Amino acid sequence: MRVENDHCDVIGVPAAPTQLDRLSSAILRQGGMARVSLPGDVVTWAAARHQTLRQMLSDQRFNKDWRQWRALQDGEIPEDHPLIGICKVDNMTTAHGADHRRLRGLLSSSFAPSRIALLAPRVEQCVDRLLAEMAQHGGSADLMSEFAAPLPTNVIAELFGLPDEQREEIVALTYSLANTSATGEEVRQTRQRIPEFFRRLIALKRGQLGDDLASALIVARDKGELVSDTELIDMLFMVLSAGFVTTAGVIGNGVLALLTHPQQLHLVRSGQVPWSQAIEEILRWGSSAANLPFRYATQDVEIDGCLVRRGDAVLMAFHAANRDEKAFGPGANRFDVTRRHNPHLSFGEGPHSCLGAALARLELRCAFPALFGRLEDLALTIAAEDVVYMPSYVIRFPQRLPVSFRPSVA
């Protein structure tokens, strides 16, 4: 049975990320596909069921090329809408077909699991340094700014070849771009500042090319493997920002989950559940990629009884899909580190699956055991309901996470 768009109930997506659980439940009740209205009166589809989203991620009738978005091409989406800066880019994440293979091929060897495994000592050293600095500051800290964000930022910045003095600026720019509550003026400023940042970086790196990802991409542009300066800038930004923002979010979400579920934490700390298994549950339940825009229909597609028309945008509702009872059972909403069947979609699926998955898992497997092993009596210093999240319905993680602890003598 086909369901026309006009006859579907439209679910409002709240700007506040604290309502994400309620939103995901509402979307799942609609079935595999639901109509949603994003802030700014942007009406799209949302793929919510685990099986529906999983199939769509590999369905060639949908791609991520923003030029396919009919509402954008028709001028219905203003250029200063917060989603524009996220969607309107030309890099590996929005390419498809031969272009996607070309761009992914430039990076795939650098992120091969065998090569990432060699980074373990460097990641562990970074963890050790950050925990030592936290201990020196006393028995309290903001876990986000002093550990969760610096760890993946420093790791990807080293691989990328980003100078120390520029790391704080790119973190601020990435968070600004992800802010879906930004004003039109803030959106315009961010979209102007990002290419300016990378033009300065490119000029700096050209004079001192090295064995790093930024240098490799600059050389690829010089060889014609990247077809424009815009593509080079967008690729540089994609590698750098994607390399830290989601992993920082998972660390923050994971610490919050464990501290608010002490019985689950006990199972891991006592050795009854291995950290590797707990981390997969953290990735499922606490994924920072909540609702990623967009996949676009390249033709009329009937899916789960709904007619998605050519040019329609589909929000990828990962948070909802990772809580789908049809995939994870009746306890899908529960944080449960004993969960063994855990086919979460937090790293995507299909051709656009996350290239940095091995690096993210490495960082998480170094971070969590050290964090909970070396900071005794780790606890929140505010109520969980008072945690302030990033102002975004695209990504979800705490802006700040105040904690207290006792540094371990060991």
Image (cartoon, rainbow, N blue to C red):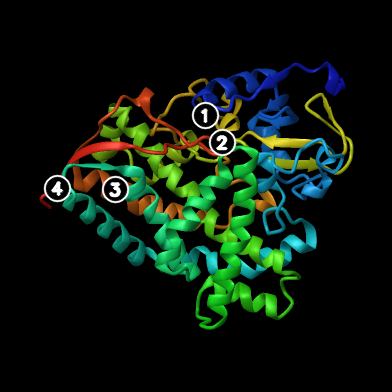
Asked whether the residues under the numbered discs 1 and 4 touch, taking CB atoms below 8 Å apart as contact, a structural biologist would say no
- C-alpha gap between disc 3 and disc 4: 13 Å
Q: Residues within 10 Å of mark 4 (few under 14, many from 20)?
A: few
The residue depicted at 20 percent of the width and 48 percent of the height is: 374
Three-letter code for the amino acid on which mark 4 is drawn: Ser
Looking at the image, the residue that sits furthest to the left is 409
Q: Which mark is residue 64?
A: none
Circle on res. 369 = 3
If you read the primary sequence from the N terminus, does the residue marked by circle 1 or circle 4 appear first? 1
- Position of 178 relative to 242 (above/below): above
From the image, tell me which residue sits under label 4: 408
Rendered residue at 30%/57% (across/down) = 127
Q: Quadrant of the N terminus?
A: top right
Instruction: Name the N-terminal-most of marks 3 and 4.
Output: 3
- Residue 3 appearing in the image: no
Of badges 3 and 4, nearer the viewer stands 4
Horizontal relation, residue 77 to residue 17: left or right = right
Instruction: Using the rendered view, name the quadrant where residue 383 is placed.
Output: top left
The residue labelled by disc 2 is 290
Across and down, in percent, residue 148 comes to: 37, 48
Decide if residue 149 is on the left or right side of residue 142: right
Q: N-terminal of the two: label 3 or label 1?
A: 1
